[in-house]
Every structure is written in structure tokens, then in C-alpha cells.
Amino acid sequence: MKRPHKLLVIVLAALMLLHLSGCLNPVSLDKYGYVMTVGVDEGKDKKYEIVLVLQRESSGESVTDEGGAIILSDEGDTIFEAVNTLYQRLSYELNFSRTHLFVFGKGIAKSGGMEEFFSISLDKLRIRQSAMVMVCDCGVKDFLGGRGSNNEANLTKVQENLLTDEKTVGQIVITNLAKLFEACDGGRFDVAMTYGYINDKILTDAKQKDNAVSGDNPIADAKGKVGGMQSYMKGAALFDGWKMVDTLSAHDTQILNIASGRFKSGSISLKADTGEQYALLAQLDDYSVSIDMDDGVNATISLTISITIEQDLTKELGSQWEKKGKKMVTDYFTDELMRIAKRCQKYKSDALGLGRAVSRKFKTVREWEDFDWKQVYPDADIEFEVDVILSDYYIAITRQ
């Protein structure tokens, strides 16, 4: 009586595997073009130029993480119009379930066009809220095209590279869709975004170098600028709500990340008043914000930074740490933090996120909204209490 039962189980298992084999058939993947990146720029004939970076997967192509990207573009007054136009030119369906990055041109960012663009329902395209958002200083199509190295489009690793850079260098700011919507809808803070550039003088392969040097229009400084990608990301764009209002250098972005508590670690250049240049490997160990509203808004940001001296040609910073080194480095960080805080206030960008701490002082949402933080913020009193610790002097002196 047990044999028929076992036979039935085997038959059912075989049927289940047969069903799954249809899902795993690589030919079915050829029906989709997976959109990894969406670029948005000002259009010539219509409101937007939409640039899509696709990762193609099929049985007839050998596609890798580095070389499997396809760049498409078209214009439309909405993303749906542009996508529908692209559909007519493609033999496969566009799928946005893997989209991990939005890149906006600075014209769109400065005009506040992000707000209108994101008024669409992302759910209809199955775009995840974890997708990152950044701004580029050049044309979006040029920027995305400049991610090519040796004629391979290195676009599928952008998200991974950004996350790594934020943790180990601190010269960019990661912002995703969820954070952008929270900032613009809630009004408790403003975002800063990674800023991108392009250097078209970088030659991406040896063939281009030969053509540039021996051709009709040689690039004079081609030597030493061969290989790598023309597009790169450093610094940040500051926002007031939906509008980009300022940009920060890579160094200033590191200071912003320290001031807002986002900084993990990174090498920071310090130039003393006497002209000496130092390189410090810094790590943010402790961070807290306290708010006093007895007489206006008074914010005190307390933080502890541990450093290792990477370069000190004077060989005095570490050896005289308690005598003068600690005070010099502490004063330097305090002054830099205050400079960036005042710059953010000047442009009404609460990229430090102080509104989050201030909002906790109110019992109801109505009270918080009536307080009108965005109008109060530029006049808030901000102070920094900085403690700098020399964490490993032995490494510092052995590297000299």
C-alpha cells in the first residue's frame, strides 16, 4: 500500500521541477531589459531627456557586471512618455525592478524639477525606495557614457562604489529615494547628494591615446591621463527642499559628514596657519546633539574624533601632542565645522539634520508645523564641542 504513495510523491516532485525549469530557462530573460540607472536631464524639444542604462541578460549574449550595459535615451514630458517612445524601438520589455540609481542634471536639480518628476507613481514602475539619487555637473548622457573604461560600461557597480566610498573616504553623501521623500515631505532636514563630474581629457584606452597624439588635434596633456573612467564622483550638492542651492568640494563634504554624524573614516588634509600640511586618518567615534530652546534655538553638537597621523614632515605634531598638537587639531576641526554649518545656514539647507533633534521638543505635529523650522533654522545658534584623540602614535612615527 505504501508503494503507490511513494510513486505519487515522485511524480508530483517531477511535475514541480518541470514547472520551475520554465522560470529558469535563460531564453525567457531575453524578454527584458533591466534598467539599472535612470538619468534625467533638460530636454531640447520636451521637458525631460530620459537616459536609461540597461543590463541585458539572454542566452545569446555573454553579459558581465562590467561590460553588459546598454545606454538608451529619448525625450518626453514625463518618464512614462519617454519610456513608451523607447518601447517602440525595442524588441524587449523594460523592467525597473533592479533600478538602483537616479542621476539628475544640475539644471533640473537647481530648478526644483525633481519634485515634478517624482510626482509620478514609482510603484507603477516597481522602482524601489532604496534607489540612490545623485546630481552631475555635466550632461547626464555624457556622465553616464563617461563611466566607460576601455569601451566597457562600468555602470552596474555604481551603487556598490558609492557605498564603499562613503564608508572609507567620506567625500560623498549617500541619499536614496526614501530619504529624499522624508526630507521634502517632513521638513525636518534637508538632503545632500553625491555630485558627479566628467573629464573628457582622460583617454580610456591606448588606441584613443595614439589617435589623440598623432591625429590632427592632439591632446597636449594626454601623457599620464590614460585609462580609468572619464566620469567620477566627489563632493556633494546641498538642497533646500527639492532645490539644489550649493555644491561642496570633497574636503567640505567630509566636514559636512562629520558635522552631521554620517562620517565613518577617511584621510583628511590639515593645513596649519604656519603653512605646514598634515594628513590625518580620522574616525568619528562619538556623536550627539543637544537642543536648548529657552532663548531661541541653541544646538550643541558634541563629537569625538580619533586620528592617526599619516604625514607630518615636521615630526612635531605627534611628539608634541599634549603640548600643542591636540589643541591645533581640535581648533582646526572646530573652525572647519563652524564654517560648513554657517554655509548650510546661509543657503537654508539643514543638511546637518538639526531639525530632527528640534522636532522632538514638540508634543504634536501641529505644534512642529506651526514652528516653521525652515524660517528659524538660518538664525539658530550652533556650537561644536570637539574632542580629538591621537589613537596610534606608534604607526604615525613609523610611517615618517
Image: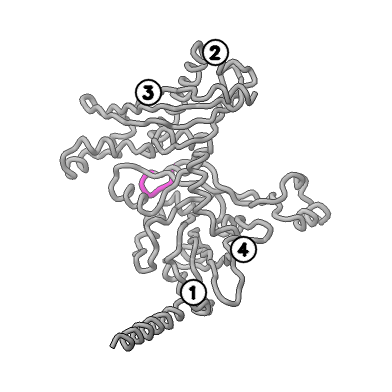
Q: Position of residue 290 (x, y in %)?
A: 28, 29
Q: Neighbour class for label 3 at 10 Å: few (<14), some, many (≥20)?
A: some
Between discs 1 and 4, the one toward the N terminus: 1
The residue carrying mark 4 is: 67
Find numbered disc 3 in the image and state the secondary structure of the residue it sits on: strand
Q: At x 52% / y 68%, what residue is drawn?
A: 74
Question: In the rendered structure, which disc, 1 or 2, sits on the residue that comes first in sequence?
Answer: 1
Q: Which residue is mark 2?
A: 320
Inspect the image, locate mark 1, and give the three-letter code of the amino acid beneath it.
Answer: Tyr
Quarter of the image holding residue 386? Answer: top left
Answer with left or right where residue 155 lies relative to residue 341: right
Question: Farthest residue toward the front?
Answer: 1
How far apart are the two marked residues, 3 and 2, measured between alpha carbons?
Answer: 22 Å
- Within the magenta stretch, is there residue 242? yes
Q: Is residue 194 above or below residue 145?
A: above
Of pointers 3 and 1, the one earlier in the residue sequence: 1
Give the residue at x 43% y 33%. 258
Which element type, helix, strand or loop, lies under badge 2?
A: loop
The residues tagged by marks 4 and 2 sit, at their Cα atoms, a distance apart of 52 Å
Whole-number angstrom distance, CA of label 3 to CA of label 1: 54 Å
In the image, residue 296 sits, relative to residue 347, either above or below, namely above
Boundaries of the magenta span: 240-245
Q: Please rate how many residues cluster around mark 4, counting C-alpha atoms within 10 Å: few if below 14, some from 14 to 19, many from 20.
A: some
